[in-house]
Amino acid sequence: MDRSTKLCFLLLTCPLLACSDDVPEVAEPTTTDDSGTTTDVATTITPTTMPGPETDTDPDPDTTAGDSDTTGDPNTSSTTDETATSSSSSSSSGEMTTTTGPACGDDMVDIGEECDGMDLGGMDCAGLGMGFSGGTLACADDCSMFDTSGCFSCGNDIIEGTEVCDGMDLGGSTCATEGFVDGTIACAGDCTLDTSMCSTCGDDVIDLGEDCDGVDLGGNTCVGLGMGFTGGSLACDGMCGFDTGGCTNTPWPVVGEVIVTEIMPNPDVVPDADGEWFEIYNPAMGVSYQLGTCMFEGATDTGFTIDMDMVIGPQEYRTFSVSTMVDQGFLADYQWPPMDYNLTNSNDEVRLICDGVMVDEVAYSSMTFPFSAGQSANLDPMSYDAVLNDDSANWCAGTSSYNGDFGTPGADNTVCMGEVTYSIDFCRLQFPDVIAEPEGTDVDVFGRVFIAGLTDLSGVNDPSPAVIGYVGYGPDGTNPEVDPGWVWTAGVPNGMYGPASPGYEVNNDEYQALLSVPSPPGDYDFAFRFSGDDGVTFSYCDGQPEGSSNGYAPADAGQMTSQAGGPPPVMFFSEYAEGSSNNKAVEIYNANGSDVDLSSCAVQFYANGGVVPSNTINLAGILAADDVFVVCENNIDPMVFDPLNCDLLDPGSFYNGDDAVELLCGVDTLDVIGEIGFDPGSEWLVGGVGTQNETIRRDCSVTAGDANGGDAFDPSVEWASFPLNDFSDFGQYICP
């Protein structure tokens, strides 16, 4: 063992020394006695100590190293003395002298280390020259070598390390697994997926580079492409480009090439809001026209645009109706939004515009055009011309029934031959023949009629505008043919009549009418009557099987007993709105303390000081105690008040500020706003509270309505005023 190794073991300081470094050989001290003999002297090496408190530099006499006396010849130096001096000098300066080797783990590459922690000396997997193409290089725990376990060799067709793929090995990845619809996936040179050949076409979402995708056309149409198409169906092909194979070049009509031929502004079987319609016709032979993107306008309405592909062929009709869930009696070719267009009952226009050209226009007036409630204005087929249809003389009322109303939507019009009349061949009071109900009760009464050549056409009802049925009542034992005291109510054809009806008669039509049991209580007769000439003459029908065939006999009439009823319910108007345009509504509050059947109740308007109602709105349903019932004008603006919050939408003419409004049940008046029979001018106005251009709410102190419609009306006594179009409390009973 050489000297340096011995010293390492003796001092036990090898971990602190760089044992691999060369250590100079230390000469062993010797002494020579008088005889000339040389003797080795033991040497003590004092290890370097940590800095500490200052110590005495004088050597302790007890710590002299070795067995021999070293204090002899002053010229003789010992290692011990040098070492001690060095140690003392070091101690007294407070410093430590330490000799160390490389420290693995300090993230610094020292001599003898390949790497250290995060310090890789700038090397990476590819730079090692070991065939790696990438990955994560690390350092071994002892700093003696690199850790290449995270390196990989891209291109060997084996997925390694952080590789997503390698050559032909795609790891199961496809275009679909990477969120694409179709295509071919590959592995890039850096062992990541190459999706450049994958495609998203087919996912119904337009991506960069696609014109369209599946059903997503980006809002484009054949017309909108600007390629000269007028209509047709645009599609998307398999490469996500536009497919114009379904687009067409059918021309739009120009002036007079399509004409308006029929208009129904005032249906009767269904409300105006559900039953308005009109019809157009292409009189050309062999020429079709595109109607898509054409629009219809009224005199004041915004109008609507045909937002679909629609072609009208040669001598073809197209019908347009208001959008509704109600059965209109026919299927229109197009339904318009109710807020965009409506046909008024008095004066209006139907104007067709295509590609900026006004094709046809008909301006009608109830004063000159021959239509009435339930009958269309029908252009004579001999006048199918854009000029001739401007003349009201070429129009007549529809006479063919399609749902109980009269017209020919989508079919050839009726030839105008003047008014058709019929003779009543037979009629009968059908059912019931006995009524015993409290006064004010409404009862459905049915009558039948036979007219040769009309009612025997189809086996069900074959109505005509000229044929009208009525139910009536009068004093017991009187003859309605001569007694003027009878009261009559018009009926309508019974739409449910057919082979399944009780006592069905194939050649007869059946009508029904509502009879309100009269006051005062007592006995009355009731019967049916029919007219075939629009009310000029009548045939009277009693209730026996023979009916009118053996004449009218009071003894064979229906027998009615009106019974005394209980007190009328306690209900009154709690809110009234006379807003802008059609924004009008009344709210009825049930203060009765119990539910009320509204079937015998109605709201009536008296226009301009009239004593006869200008409009009667029959109510229906059950009104719960402390609840309200809201009656609205049919065309109320949804931006002002949601029509869905109305319990009843009425298409008839509503009130103005100078019109009285009455609430009645049976024959009992429950409440009146205004004064019946008196016109105040523009409104009833007292103390800043009025009935025009404002909303008024009933005071909390009011517990019953004003049942006297003939007394003076002062709105400031029981009502509070709120701004125009304030509908914030409608639908809930809130009193000011």
Image (cartoon, grey):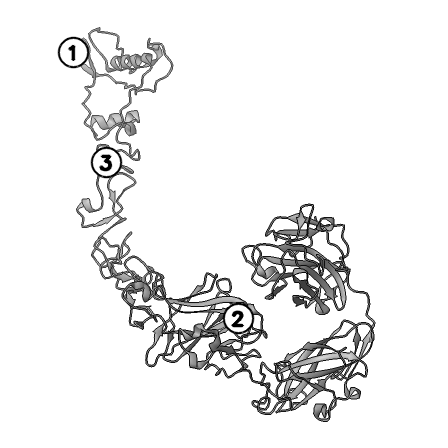
Under mark 3, the amino acid is Glu
Under mark 2, the amino acid is Pro
| Mark 3 surroundings: few (<14), some (14-19) or many (≥20) residues within 10 A | some
Q: Nearer the viewer, residue 215 or 322?
A: 322
Tell me the CA gap for discs 2 and 3.
Answer: 101 Å
Q: Nearer the viewer, residue 568 or 594?
A: 568
Residue on which the image places disc 1 = 36
Q: Position of residue 585 (x, y in %)?
A: 63, 58
Which element type, helix, strand or loop, lies under badge 3? loop
The residue that appears at 58% across and 60% down in the rendered structure is 643
Quarter-wise, where is residue 204 in the image?
Answer: bottom left
Q: Nearer the viewer, residue 212 or 650?
A: 650
Q: Nearer the viewer, mark 2 or mark 1?
A: 2
Which comes before the other along the chain, label 2 or label 3? 3
Is 394 positioned to the left or the right of 619 in the image?
A: left
Which element type, helix, strand or loop, lies under badge 1? loop
Q: Nearer the viewer, mark 2 or mark 3?
A: 2
Under mark 1, the amino acid is Gly
The residue that appears at 32% across and 66% down in the rendered structure is 223
Name the image quarter holding the N terminus. Answer: top left
Q: Are marks 2 and 3 in contact (CB under 8 Å)?
A: no
Quarter-wise, where is residue 202 in the image?
Answer: bottom left
Can residue 702 be seen at all in this image of the molecule?
Answer: yes
Can residue 64 be seen at all in this image of the molecule?
Answer: no
Q: Nearer the viewer, residue 727 or 87?
A: 727
Q: Nearer the viewer, mark 1 or mark 3?
A: 3
Tag shown at residue 113: 3
| Mark 2 surroundings: few (<14), some (14-19) or many (≥20) residues within 10 A | many
Residue on which the image places disc 2 = 265
Q: Are marks 2 and 1 in contact (CB under 8 Å)?
A: no
